[in-house]
Image (cartoon, helix red, strand yellow):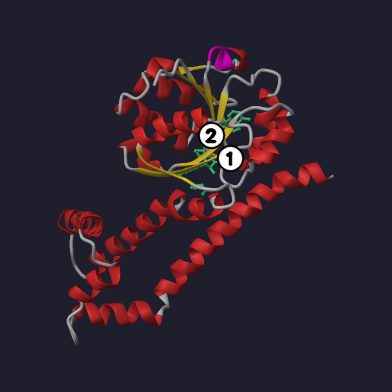
Amino acid sequence: MTIHKIAFLGAGSIAEAVIAGLTKAKAVDGRRIMVSNRSDSGRLAYLAQEYGVQGTHDKEELLRGADIVMLAMKPKDAAEALLSLKDLIGEDQLLISLMAGVSTSSMDQLLEKQIPIIRAMPNTSAAILRSATAICPSAHATERHVEMAKYLFAAVGVVSVVTEEQMHAVTALSGSGPAYIYFVVEAMEQAAREIGLTEDISKPLILQTMIGAAEMLKLTPKHPSVLRKEITSPGGTTQAGIEVLQSFEFQQALVQCISRAAERSRELGETLEQLFKQ
Ligand SMILES: NC(=O)C1=CN([C@@H]2O[C@H](COP(=O)(O)OP(=O)(O)OC[C@H]3O[C@@H](n4cnc5c(N)ncnc54)[C@H](OP(=O)(O)O)[C@@H]3O)[C@@H](O)[C@H]2O)C=CC1
Ligand SMILES: O=C(O)[C@@H]1CCC=N1
């Protein structure tokens, strides 16, 4: 697929992860990517140095010739960003929003034009081509736009097409998901220290344990509960450990964590929707 130029509005964590992945996968040449933020020139210089992209604070220059405009700012900055694009963006350009919660109808209302929009929810593993990305099209997006988004996000991992209503759920599950895993690893590292292992010993063991478990889930047809039971000898160490997790209602905590994150995605979107009700 020929992509002439991608313009990123927002140059933070997720913009960098997607840029790193796209350039690493050679799906898009860095010279075809232009990045912008409101003020942080140092950050643009870093991205230019690291990935061969161009930085600019000139919105006209940013949007000129771009076939894809990627929104990568926080939801609270969505209104300001979209209003700044309103007079510059054309209906021949595809807007891809990475923002949590912000609906395509809110974006339509702010832009006051029939811009094709795809919402995409990748995760930071895009940087190493292992993102789990969900995408959904707006009413003005065609199959060709969906194919363009699929091309980009398939280059940095796996892609699923979902409904817009499901975006809250996938944001909570796979958008935020790597953070839950890192949180578990932080606890494993703390535990390792407390039971007398130095980092040089514990780090590779924790890492390989994570990778091994993930690969098992991928390569065997067994349900995770079966894989867990295979490790849990009656009266053994795993059972003793899991009983402690159960006493803290660990699984219920995770279920509630993901449910709360999905609810938060709704709240982030509603903040913007309130604007149109005033
Ligand atoms: N981090 C993650 O893992 C994921 C994040 N997302 C979504 O991506 C979005 C960005 O998140 P993240 O990268 O973590 O956030 P960051 O805070 O790291 O980056 C936000 C960027 O947006 C820029 N920015 C803010 N307002 C504007 C504006 N009006 N015009 C242009 N640039 C602007 C900021 O720079 P400056 O302040 O200089 O303008 C900064 O470069 C969020 O909406 C989030 O929901 C989606 C998937 C995963
Ligand atoms: O925490 C957030 O709001 C964003 C969305 C998904 C991951 N990070």
Report helix, strand or loop for mark 1.
loop
Looking at the picture, how far across and down is residue 85, in whole percent? 66, 23
Outermost residue on the left side: it is 201
Q: Is mark 1 within 8 Å of ligand 1?
A: yes
43 or 86, nearer to the observer = 86
Q: CA distance from mark 2 to mark 1?
A: 7 Å
Outermost residue on the bottom side: it is 235
Q: Please, is residue 122 above or below residue 218 in the view?
A: above
Q: Quadrant of the C terminus?
A: top right
Badge 2 amino acid: Ala
> At 71% from the left edge and 19% from the top edge, which residue is drawn?
87
Looking at the picture, how far across and down is residue 8, in whole percent? 51, 26
Outermost residue on the front side: it is 143
Q: Quadrant of the N terminus?
A: top left
Report helix, strand or loop for mark 2.
loop
Range shown magenta: 61-65
Residue where numbered disc 1 is placed: 74
Looking at the picture, how far across and down is residue 219, in whole percent? 20, 55
Looking at the picture, how far across and down is residue 223, in whole percent? 28, 67
Residue 33 in which image quadrant = top left
> At 45% from the left edge and 15% from the top edge, which residue is drawn?
4
Q: Residues within 10 Å of mark 2 (few under 14, many from 20)?
A: many
Give the total number of marks visible in the rendering: 2
Residue 88 is left or right of residue 34, and the answer is right
